[in-house]
Image (cartoon, rainbow, N blue to C red):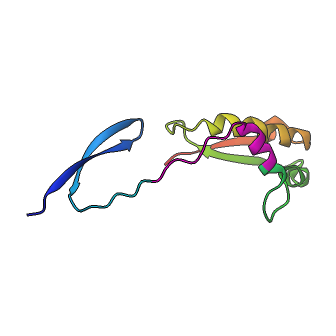
Amino acid sequence: MTKNKEITADYWDKKIQISVPENTVLPVVPPPPLLKEPDVAVRKSLENPIGAPDLFELAKKAKGGKIVIAHDDLTRPAPPRRIIIPIIMDVLNKAGIRDEDVFLLSANG
């Protein structure tokens, strides 16, 4: 009979105990380093995307149309949503897109 060991795992906003075979190898992946100025990094990424026009240029072409921004649902502990959406809205507004032409789609899952 295989011996088991108990490990602690992150599950949503809590830690749980899981029993796994004793010889299980568990990779440890460190989280990426935190950005000192995430808003600056977001703006830079939107202004200089890889292999695509920047958001401002895309938005100018969409003027008069409708835009959908998909975002993670509120059950996810995702502060980026609070940083990214206002920055995207700022770029869209500067390109002539009205707030009422932008729809937020919560990507539940």
Q: Residue at x 46, y 53 (%)?
A: 29
Number of numbered markers: 0
Could you say which is closer to the camera, residue 102 or residue 28?
28
To which quarter of the image does residue 23 belong?
bottom left
Residue 62 image point, x, y percent: 86, 52
Q: Which residues are magenta?
A: 29-44
* Residue 84 included in the magenta stretch of the image: no
Q: Residue at x 79, y 57 (%)?
A: 49
Q: Is residue 63 left or right of residue 70?
A: right
Q: Is residue 38 left or right of residue 92?
A: left
Residue 91 image point, x, y percent: 85, 42
* Residue 37 included in the magenta stretch of the image: yes
Q: Residue at x 64, y 38 (%)?
A: 81
Could you say which is closer to the camera, residue 95 or residue 46?
46
Residue 87 image point, x, y percent: 78, 38
- The image shows residue 98, relative to residue 107, as above or below, that is above
Q: Residue at x 38, y 42 (%)?
A: 10
Assign the N terminus to one quadrant of the image.
bottom left
To which quarter of the image does residue 72 belong?
top right
Q: Is residue 69 left or right of residue 72?
A: right
Residue 26 image point, x, y percent: 34, 57
